[in-house]
Amino acid sequence: MNETNEHNKHLEELENKQYRRGIAVYACQSDTTHPKVLELAYGAGAITQERYEVLSNPEKGTRPVLEPEELEVILETYFGFNRGVYQEYECHGIQKGRFGQRLAGELRYTGEERTDKEWLATGLASREAKEKSRYGGFIRMEEHDGYSELSIDDILGQGRGIGDY
């Protein structure tokens, strides 16, 4: 009985909290230093020629490492992160990078996706970001929204279930 009361108290606390709903976005360390991303960042002036050359040709056995300011600009511009809003984790397992590569022992950056017009215009924005921008939130199908099986049958005028032929 005591467990039930604690569980109900916990549920009440969760219901009373206001959560900020954002759209999760991620990138791996190798994604942010991918040759194509570095080339685009250099062309846009986000990194200097000297840094571009250093990052493009790391010493053998090392990974290129971006400065915090460079990383912030690249995450915002090419991966859609809200500026300055990201967390960094070290992943010990194998993960898939944004460019399809299999990665192990990498840093992974997670954050919230931008929904501004500039990001949406790039064509790189997620479907969720487009929906949030257009409708002010997400389109959700609740349990009783949409058509039930009976109403679909009524619409089709058949009056029977899908497998009843």
Image (cartoon, rainbow, N blue to C red):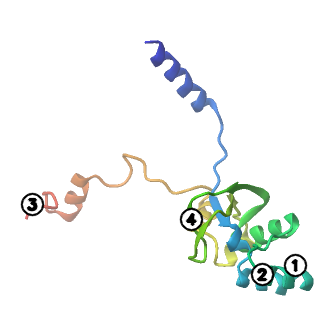
- Marks 3 and 2 sit apart, C-alpha to C-alpha, by 58 Å
Q: On the picture, is 95 further left or further right than 53?
A: left
Label 1 Cα neighbours within 10 Å, binned few <14 / some 14-19 / many ≥20 = many
Q: On the picture, is 50 further left or further right than 161?
A: right
Q: Which residue is mark 2?
A: 38
**Image-quadrant location for residue 61:** bottom right
Of residue 25 and residue 19, the one placed in the foreground of this image is 25
Q: Which residue is mark 1?
A: 47
N-terminal label among 3 and 2: 2
Residue at the farthest top position: 1
Instruction: Name the residue type under label 2.
Output: Leu
**Image-quadrant location for residue 19:** top right
Q: Is residue 3 above or below residue 95?
A: above
Query: Which callout, 3 or 1, points to the residue nearer the camera?
Result: 1
Q: Which residue is mark 3?
A: 164
Query: Which callout, 2 or 4, points to the residue nearer the camera?
Result: 4
Q: Secondary structure at mark 3?
A: loop
Label 4 Cα neighbours within 10 Å, binned few <14 / some 14-19 / many ≥20 = some
Q: Which residue is mark 4?
A: 95
- Residue visible at 39% across and 50% down? 145
Of residue 63 and residue 149, the one placed in the foreground of this image is 63
Label 3 Cα neighbours within 10 Å, binned few <14 / some 14-19 / many ≥20 = few
Instruction: Name the residue type under label 3.
Output: Asp
